[in-house]
Every structure is written in structure tokens, then in C-alpha cells.
Amino acid sequence: MRGAFYSLINFINTADINDVYADAARKILENIMLIPGCTITDVAEMCYVSTATISRLCRKLNYQSFVDFKMDVTMNLNYFNRDALRLQFDHQLPTQVKDESKTMKELFEDHFENIIANLRSTYQQVSFEQLEEIVDRMHKANEICFAGNFFTQSVAMQLEIELTYSGKRCTGMYPLASQIEIAKRLTENDVIIVSSIAGGFMVDHPDVMREIAKSKAYKICITQLEDFIYRDYVDMLVKVGTDHYSLIGKFSITYIFEVLEAMYHLKYGGK
């Protein structure tokens, strides 16, 4: 759950080096811990720009207002430290705490073994037939829409490229408002793929899931989470990883998208 960080860094990396908005974004990122307690005037003074510039920057970052941006930053900061530990341990916090008796080498070895276990579990529980059905449905669809947070959207991008190259229409917008609007216009001839490592997207964004649930499109969800809000409205659940829902599941999510890309290319690529 680091959407605000992704948005800021992505904007900085793709903006002109002398862009005034990129400079403001850098200053905000440098002082990110202060943002939850700041007003828009405070941030403008921090960045040596006007409040209007901060408002425009927030819109460039795909937030409707500074208030929305501030709320997302606050939520991201609350998740940040917990996420750092969930990358090390294959258990959902707070039940699992850091074992101070372990050396850095032992933690590294545990991390590797947890990744292998997560991938093996994914391979054992996701059938080839299930993946082939997804490939066939994408081929028949008029449009394929990818929904999720920034990380899974970026992982799905390679599959989007393969699909687009093969002549399919794809959308994969990170901004939540855009995902809601896309979900509203999809038809029964379309496919929407929701991906979330540990299910945070479904838990934290019920407004988006509500629109996805109402969509006429065929709905596929790829996640470690087995039970979530609007689960009964999803047509296919691709359950990956283990029962612990750690962020190590990102390797399994990546694996699934890469397999789907390869399968689509082998079966329909260039046709």
C-alpha cells in the first residue's frame, strides 16, 4: 500500500529535470512524514510555490484534490512499516513480530525459503485449465481492463503489451477514479482482471469493488486472499501464494501474469 510513493516517484522520474511540479514533488517526498499534519498552504511554503501549483500537482498525480492526496499519504505511512516486515516474514502482522535473535543472514535465508514456498503453493493450486480459460476469455473479449494498486498494475503492464500487440484493446489505469469510470462502461463482452497481493485493494477500496461487482464484464480476481468483500460477485478467483497473505506473494502475482503472457502469445500471438 504505497500508492502515493509510487505516484510521486513515477512523476519525478518521467518529468523534465527543471519542471517546477517535479521540484515540488521532490520536496514533498523529502518531507513526506510531515504531510499528514500540513495544510495546502504549509506544503506550498515548503515547496516555495503557490497553493494553486500544489493543487495542480495533485491533479497531475491523479488525485482530485490536495485533501485526497493528503489522505492517501497518511494511509500509506500507516502501512509502510508494517509492509517492511511483511516483506521479511511469511505471516500477516501483527501476529508475527520480528525475531531479534536471528542474524541478518538467517533472515535472508528465511526470506528466500518463504518465496520458494509461496511460488510452489501457487503452482500447486492454480491449474493449467484455469489459466487457459483466462487466456481464451481475453482473446474473445472486446476489452480487457486491469484493476488494482500501483504495483500489480505495473506487473500487468507486460501482459497488456502482449495483448495490445495482438490487437486487443486494454486499459490499466492506476487512479481509483479512472478504474471506477472504466468499470461502469464495461459490457458483458469485456473482461476485468483485479489483482492484489494480499487483498489490500479489495479491503481498502470497497467503492471501486462495488462498481466492479456491478459491472457486466467477466470478473477475474488474482490474489492470496480467499474471502473478501464482493467475493460472491467475482466470476473466477485465482488463489495464489500461501494462507499467510504476506507481500512475498508479489512473486506469485508476477509469475501468474508472466505465464498468462506466454500462454497468450503461444496460442493467439500474431493471429
Image: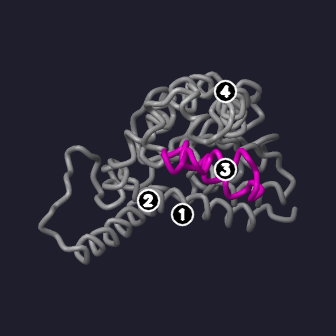
Marker disc for residue 122: 2
Give the residue type at disc 1.
Answer: Tyr
Estimate the x, y position of residue 48 in percent, counting from the top left.
64, 40
Q: Which of the two marks, 3 or 1, is nearer to us in this view?
A: 3
Q: What element does badge 2 sit on?
A: helix
Please tell me the numbered disc located at residue 158.
none
**Residues in magenta?**
2-31
Residue at 56%, 35% in the rendered image: 43
The residue that label 3 is drawn on is: 23
Q: Earlier in the sequence, mark 4 or mark 1?
A: 4
The foreground one among 241 and 60 is: 60
The residue pinned by badge 1 equals 255
Image depth: mark 4 or mark 1 in front: 4
Query: Is residue 9 part of the magenta span, yes or no?
Result: yes
Residue 206, given in percent of the width and then of the height, sits at 51, 25
Image side of residue 10 versus residue 109, left or right: right
Which of the marked residues, 4 or 3, is nearer the chain's N terminus? 3
Q: Is residue 173 left or right of residue 117?
A: right
Query: Which amino acid is tagged 4?
Result: Gln
Q: Which tag, 2 or 4, sits closer to the chain's start?
A: 4
Q: Amino acid at mark 3?
A: Asp
Per the image, the residue denoted by label 4 is: 64
Estimate the spatial distance between the alpha carbons at disc 3 and disc 1, rounded to whole Å: 36 Å
Give amino acid for label 2. Answer: Thr
Question: What secondary structure characterizes most of the magenta part?
Answer: helix
Name the spot of residue 82 as percent of width and height, x first. Answer: 33, 47
Please indicate whether residue 253 sits to the left or right of residue 16 in the image. left
Does residue 207 belong to the magenta stretch? Answer: no
Q: Quadrant of the C terminus?
A: bottom right
